[in-house]
Image (spheres, helix red, strand yellow):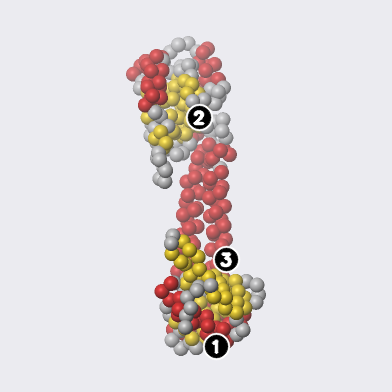
Amino acid sequence: MESKMNKKIFVRTLMDWCIVIVLSVVCYFDIQPAIHMNMNPEKLYQQGYIYKGENSNDVLAIKVLDIDPNPIERKNNTYYLVKHEYGVTAMKVIKGSVNKLLEIKEVLAPQENPLESSDFYLHVQVLPEIRRRRRSSDIVIISQGFKGIIQERFNQSDLSKGGATVDTTHLLDLMDDKGVAHFLVKPVLVGLAAFFFFINTLRRTFYLRRQFKLFNTLFPGYANQPERLVKVADYGDHSLRMLVHQDVLVLYGSEFQVVPVKSINQIKLFRTRRKGHFRYKAKLFFHSGSSLQLDVNSDVIEVQYRFFEYLATLAPIEIVDEWEQNFE
């Protein structure tokens, strides 16, 4: 009996648990950049989170081998060409954030990869040539004109010596000055949503369990089987997933609720319009002050109306009819 109850509860809460799982997975992946940003970039590099000239949404690390001291100024942004173990890439920086690199390079003797022995590791994020968006037009981050500027600066730079090549299909965004908080907004919001759905789903699961136990107490011969009770109920229709037996209303559709008919104060029938179609709804108000809203299939609204009419014969229930169907 317990396993049958658990199965029915699981079916009714499956979609809720799926939402919790999806949000939790999204939160897990969204928080990875913050975790990586909080790590020492050298340790991040050693763990294999390295920029290798490929697209990524994560925070990665590079080991700086050399830097061109001449900045590229474009649209109020500053870029420096940086040489790392996988080539040369233009890196977007906040002015002054690479001064230490530039100062060390200045005092070092001219040589290939002068910063290699200095163990400079940086946190970076990848900016792709084009940022794809699902519901709107794509954003071009690296225009053909900008590519030409990067290539020209590279050709004039000492970084072009020794067979190095420049990648003009990606930019790097230096993240060391932005801090962890920059990456926490989205995962925190998603995590809060996941927690909210988890708590609500847990509460709903316990509520359904209480309702099934109440049903089993009232109708022990039909424990966990309202579908069987509808055949002998005082009034019921399987198409509605509702029945009345011994002055008790049982809803056994996507929701499961067992309430005495006399606890209902008012039934409001109303409809909403969406995309040119009416959606029929019913809201049950209880003497306790709580309420329950139901979606009504337009194919069975007359059957549903007759059902509510029957409820009104069992108790002084006010029916507020805004369906405007004029059932006879």
Residue at the disc numbered 2: 174
| Tally of marks | 3
Between 105 and 26, the residue placed more toward the observer is 26
Q: CA distance from mark 1 to mark 2?
A: 71 Å
Give the residue at x 47% y 72%: 296
Question: x, y percentage for residue 231?
Answer: 43, 86
The answer to whether residue 97 of the structure is visible from this angle is: yes
Residue at the disc numbered 3: 203
Give the residue at x 52% y 17%: 102
Of the numbered discs 1 and 2, the one sitting upstream in the chain is 2
Q: Helix, strand, or loop for circle 3? A: helix
Give the residue at x 56% y 49%: 189
- Which mark's residue is nearer the viewer, 3 or 1? 1
Q: Helix, strand, or loop for circle 1? A: loop
Give the residue at x 43% y 76%: 300
Question: x, y percentage for residue 215?
Answer: 53, 80
User: What is the three-letter code of the residue carrying label 1?
Assistant: Gln
User: What is the three-letter code of the residue carrying label 3?
Assistant: Arg
Evaluate if marks 1 and 2 touch, with contact meaning CB atoms under 8 Å apart: no
**Badge 1: residue crowd in 10 Å (few <14, some 14–19, many ≥20):** few
Residue at the disc numbered 1: 246
Identity of the residue furthest to the top in this view: 109
**Badge 3: residue crowd in 10 Å (few <14, some 14–19, many ≥20):** few
Residue 285: give its label: none
The answer to whether residue 121 of the structure is visible from this angle is: no
Evaluate if marks 2 and 3 touch, with contact meaning CB atoms under 8 Å apart: no
Q: CA distance from mark 3 to mark 1?
A: 28 Å
Between 173 and 245, the residue placed more toward the observer is 245
Of the numbered discs 2 and 3, the one sitting upstream in the chain is 2
